Image (spheres, rainbow, N blue to C red):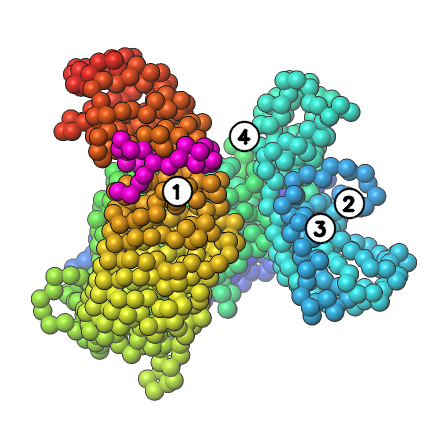
């Protein structure tokens, strides 16, 4: 029998205790009842730990926990309504007669409800007292537990069990061996080196026993050893240090190694390893290999007809070795029909599903707090495999009341910590990161999702109350008896006229789909904390009554929303306002002093829209873009924004508008916008000053009016765009963490004197007077992965060392019309194993691309684009060099390069174009054999082909006939009178896509959607006849 988690009840009870302690105990007439209820709740809380354990074997205790949860939810609802009406009364007093709006609650109604609340609190007290009495009758023990107990698990691994299957770590083993055998000199002097392996891919054992040291001493005395501690969970620093001190006495030999496997990032850091190696999930192929090995008989072959189903089952394992191992054992000896059933329904408890659940449950049981457990189980509300934004998830947790602030950390900080713990314990998996390496979206493994869902007990079968609902399609209205309990609803539709007033408890509401306006029934959702209309809704205006949603913490708007209502300024609990840049803010946004997210602020002239509105918003976090700075008079007015006093604003963008004719005061204004030293990203656009203010020139800020200069050491990214009057860029060499630099439209900058290093991305675009780049730019920035140099017409050469950039992934050199050299190459092949996309366009004076440079790039080049290089002389040699050495080339563009000449047939035959998918080249009479040879080399891979005739093109490459995967064909300036019949045999073109043929002024497009069964049925006719046929 499976027990019931008490986490949900514990969170609710603690929230109620906090509520009365902080707010309601001071209300006149409620203080005595409030104190009594706190005592009752404290007693209830002490029973919960024992109740969770006993619920495994006693149905009566399980039922008590579920009833207690219902009582706690009801109490939470009643008290939240009281809080709402107190807020409503406060707002009502603040409103002037000018901006009052019709309220659905009159003053008389509020007083009446306050009396009802006093009676309701007495009833809540009585309900909890009744639950206390039942707890005594059930024999529950009162106990206070400060930390979770270790959970006994019967799944212990050891070195003596025979499991010959070792699959899927071919990439990890060499790295592990290298870590152990190539330590630094000072590490070689130590007795042993420690390596930690982190991930769900570790095995399923428990920590070692206390007597293991005695056995180790006996076995290892005088020997060099490699000790593996499998699936370690203990994160007690003192215990680990004691273990290390003990292990030092086992042997006096040096050069030993310890490998620790763990699912906890915290454990990995505590053991102080020389390396932490993260294990990724296995591939589908590896999972299938494990399953096959477990199911196969002595011949090693899976019975005929089973493989297709088996591979589907392997996909369901989602890279988890444990799942592949267990399911493989279950499948052994089963029929094909039984395999199919397991693929469709997964494993029952009797077939091993219970074993997997228990092992995964260990990660859940060791979570440190009920709130953290509740945050984890909530993640199962989303469908399996759904990518979820970290920021959105934390806001949902907050709205549900899972995140209680501490003296040091607010709710969002607690949510961030909880999220990281779930990641560190492999209960969530990173799906995407932003360019700075921060987690953006996550996903939950299907088996972990099953675990979270089972603990949440959010069942639609009627066995438990449904409180969270995710509807992809609104196929029918939600029944009222279901709606009244829902706290979180994701609803796609808007076609059934859902009456939201029936959703009495709703805290989170996400609407998507065909909504044109916000339904009026949302007005009555007094508990609502999070309203999200950002997903594909077309709402252009929000009603004024939105200001009555006093509890709202998060509002996420869609891109169609034109402006926000004036009553927004009364939503004092609003913490996150997610709007698009074009959405107009209401006046007096500065009243919302709890606001943390406000990404865009447009300065206006009128009172209530001026920059001083930002002055009181000292809780702002993350990103802030301030537009229309030409509306700010001077430094003194800019200082009213109080930007320097906002330590959690990490990304700042300052933007002026073009087309100004009045007096420019940009230097003064920017001086008053000095940021805090915590700044990580700075963007300045259309600044018209001749010099940056001192803080921007120095890239340092004053610590107080007379304080010392503090460098912006946290700065990661700088973007300077269209600052057309400045002649020098700021001092950047003293910024140790600077990784990204974008310089665009700095028309008067002639030199870049800064000697920056450690960059990963550099873009220089539209610097019309730039003469040269720093001499050691490339040697000092070996981590550069993205480099763009564009529209610099005076620039004549790049510094040496371009080919030494081993991390380079994207190189663009565009429209530098006087560029003659891209620098001299340095010896040696490129060491990177990554991919390189190389594009050079519009550099008409460039005469040579050094072969040695291309040779060093060739093994990693995936895309090469050479366009508009009229002076390039060594192209045939370059192509020959590239095609011989590159095994990754997928895209090749050569256009506007007159020196493209025919290669020898022997040379073309040696080219490796087997991975080429995209080819766009100019063709002429002199390179027929070369083109034919190229097409033959990529006949089994090419999907996109564009040929443009430049002179005397009166032939069509016959090798096109053999391009079996081609689904896009474009031919320009074709000089043939008739198209060959074989063109109609290209089935991939006929079945799927598109052909474009241009001959002089004539353009003919043929799509699959045309009425012809075979668009090439008239290929033997002339081009003009095809045009007539298509026009019909």
Q: Is residue 376 above or below residue 93?
A: above
**Distance CA(mark 2)–CA(mark 1):** 56 Å
| Label 1 packing within 10 angstroms: few (<14), some (14-19), many (20+) | many
Which is in the foreground here, disc 2 or disc 4?
2
Which is in the foreground here, disc 1 or disc 4?
1
Q: Earlier in the sequence, mark 2 or mark 3?
A: 2
**Distance CA(mark 1)–CA(mark 3):** 52 Å
Depth order, front residue of 322/166: 166
Contact, mark 2 vs mark 1 (Cβ under 8 Å) = no
Q: Is residue 846 visible?
A: yes
| Label 4 packing within 10 angstroms: few (<14), some (14-19), many (20+) | few
Residue 868 lies in the magenta stretch: no
Q: Which mark is residue 231?
A: 3
Q: Earlier in the sequence, mark 3 or mark 4?
A: 3
Give, as a single range, the part of the protein colored magenta: 898-927
Q: Earlier in the sequence, mark 2 or mark 4?
A: 2
Return the residue at label 2.
157
Contact, mark 2 vs mark 3 (Cβ under 8 Å) = yes
């Amino acid at each position: 029998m499976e027990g019931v988690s008490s986490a949900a009840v514990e969170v609710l009870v603690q929230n109620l205790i906090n509520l009365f302690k902080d707010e309601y105990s001071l209300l006149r007439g409620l203080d005595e009842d409030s104190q009594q209820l706190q005592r009752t709740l404290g007693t209830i809380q002490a029973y919960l730990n024992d109740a969770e354990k006993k619920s495994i074997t006693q149905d009566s205790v399980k039922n008590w926990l579920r009833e207690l949860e219902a009582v706690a939810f009801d109490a939470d609802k009643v008290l939240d309504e009281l809080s709402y009406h107190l807020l409503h009364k406060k707002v009502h007093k603040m409103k002037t007669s000018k901006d009052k709006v019709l309220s659905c609650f009159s003053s008389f109604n509020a007083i009446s409800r306050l009396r009802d609340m006093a009676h309701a609190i007495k009833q809540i007290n009585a309900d909890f007292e009744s639950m206390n009495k039942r707890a005594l009758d059930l024999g529950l023990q009162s106990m206070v537990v400060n930390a979770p107990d270790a959970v006994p698990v019967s799944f212990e691994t050891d070195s003596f069990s025979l499991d010959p299957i070792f699959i899927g770590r071919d990439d990890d083993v060499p790295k592990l061996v290298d870590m152990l055998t190539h330590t630094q000199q000072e590490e070689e002097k130590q007795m042993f080196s420690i390596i930690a392996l982190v991930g769900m891919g570790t095995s399923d054992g428990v920590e070692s026993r206390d007597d293991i040291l005695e056995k180790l001493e006996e076995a290892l005395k005088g020997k060099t050893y490699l000790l593996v501690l499998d699936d370690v969970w203990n994160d007690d620093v003192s215990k680990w240090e004691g273990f290390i001190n003990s292990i030092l006495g086992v042997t006096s030999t040096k050069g030993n190694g310890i490998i620790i496997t763990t699912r906890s990032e915290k454990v990995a850091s505590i053991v102080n390893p020389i390396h932490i190696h993260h294990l990724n999930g296995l591939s589908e192929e590896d999972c299938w290999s494990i399953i096959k090995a477990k199911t196969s008989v002595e011949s090693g072959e899976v019975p005929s007809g089973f493989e297709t189903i088996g591979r589907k089952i392997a996909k369901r394992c989602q890279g988890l070795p444990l799942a592949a191992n267990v399911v493989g054992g279950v499948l052994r000896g089963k029929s094909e029909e039984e395999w199919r059933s397991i693929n469709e329904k997964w494993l029952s408890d009797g077939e091993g599903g219970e074993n997997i659940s228990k092992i995964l449950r260990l990660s859940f049981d060791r979570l440190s707090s009920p709130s953290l457990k509740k945050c984890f189980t909530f993640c199962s509300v989303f469908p399996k495999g759904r990518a979820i934004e970290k920021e959105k998830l934390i806001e949902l947790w907050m709205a549900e009341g899972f995140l209680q602030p501490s003296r040091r950390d607010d709710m969002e900080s607690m949510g961030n910590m909880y999220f990281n713990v779930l990641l560190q314990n492999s209960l969530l998996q990173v799906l995407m990161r932003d360019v700075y390496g921060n987690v953006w979206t996550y996903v939950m493994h299907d088996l972990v999702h099953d675990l979270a869902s089972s603990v949440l007990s959010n069942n639609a079968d009627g066995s438990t109350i449904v409180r969270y609902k995710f509807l992809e399609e609104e196929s029918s209205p939600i029944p009222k008896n279901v709606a009244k309990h829902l706290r979180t609803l994701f609803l796609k539709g808007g076609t059934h006229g859902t009456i939201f007033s029936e959703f009495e408890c709703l805290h989170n509401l996400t609407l998507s789909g065909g909504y044109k306006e916000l339904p009026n029934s949302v007005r009555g959702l007094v508990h609502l904390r999070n309203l999200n209309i950002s997903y594909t809704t077309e709402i252009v205006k929000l009603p004024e009554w939105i200001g009555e949603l006093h509890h709202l913490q998060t509002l996420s708007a869609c891109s169609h929303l034109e402006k926000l209502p004036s009553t927004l300024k009364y939503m004092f609990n609003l913490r996150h306002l997610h709007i698009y840049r074009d959405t107009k803010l209401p006046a007096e946004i500065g009243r919302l002093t709890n606001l943390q997210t406000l990404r865009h602020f447009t300065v206006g002239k009128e009172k209530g829209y001026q920059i001083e509105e930002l002055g009181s918003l000292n809780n702002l976090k993350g990103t802030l873009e301030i537009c229309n700075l030409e509306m700010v008079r001077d430094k003194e007015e800019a200082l009213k924004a109080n930007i320097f006093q906002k330590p959690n604003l990490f990304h700042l963008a300052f933007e002026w508008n073009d087309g100004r004719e009045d007096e420019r005061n940009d230097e003064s204004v920017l001086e008053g916008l000095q940021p805090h030293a915590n700044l990580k990203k700075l963007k300045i656009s259309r600044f018209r000053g001749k010099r940056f203010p001192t803080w921007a020139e120095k890239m340092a800020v004053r610590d107080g009016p007379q304080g010392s200069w503090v460098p912006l050491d946290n700065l990661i990214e700088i973007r300077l765009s269209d600052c057309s009057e400045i002649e020098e860029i700021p001092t950047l060499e003293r910024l140790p963490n600077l990784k990204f630099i974008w310089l665009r439209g700095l028309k008067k900058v002639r030199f870049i004197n800064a000697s920056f290093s450690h960059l990963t991305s550099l873009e220089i675009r539209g610097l019309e007077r730039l003469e040269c780049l720093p001499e050691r730019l490339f040697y000092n920035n070996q981590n550069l992965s993205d480099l763009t140099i564009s529209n610099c017409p005076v620039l004549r050469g790049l510094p040496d060392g371009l080919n030494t950039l081993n991390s380079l992934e994207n190189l663009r050199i565009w429209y530098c019309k006087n560029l003659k050299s891209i620098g001299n190459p340095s010896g040696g092949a490129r060491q990177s194993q990554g991919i390189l996309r190389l594009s050079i366009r519009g550099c008409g004076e460039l005469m040579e691309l050094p072969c040695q440079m291309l040779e060093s790039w060739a093994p990693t080049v995936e895309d090469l684009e050479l366009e508009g290089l009229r002076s390039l002389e060594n192209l045939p040699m370059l192509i020959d060099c590239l095609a011989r050495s590159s095994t990754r080339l997928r895209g090749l563009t050569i256009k506007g390069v007159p020196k493209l000449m025919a290669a020898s047939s022997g040379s073309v035959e040696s080219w490796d174009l087997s991975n080429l998918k995209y080819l766009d080249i100019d063709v002429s009479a002199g390179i027929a054999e070369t083109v034919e040879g190229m097409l033959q080399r990529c006949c089994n891979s090419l999907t996109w082909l564009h040929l443009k005739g430049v002179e005397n093109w009166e032939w069509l490459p016959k090798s096109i006939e053999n391009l079996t995967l081609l689904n896009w064909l474009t031919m320009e300036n074709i000089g043939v009178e008739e198209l060959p019949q074989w063109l109609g045999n290209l089935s991939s073109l006929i079945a799927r896509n598109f052909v474009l043929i241009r001959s002089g002024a004539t353009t003919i497009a043929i799509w699959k959607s045309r009425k012809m069964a075979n668009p090439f049925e008239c290929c033997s006719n002339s081009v003009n006849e095809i045009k007539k046929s298509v026009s019909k």
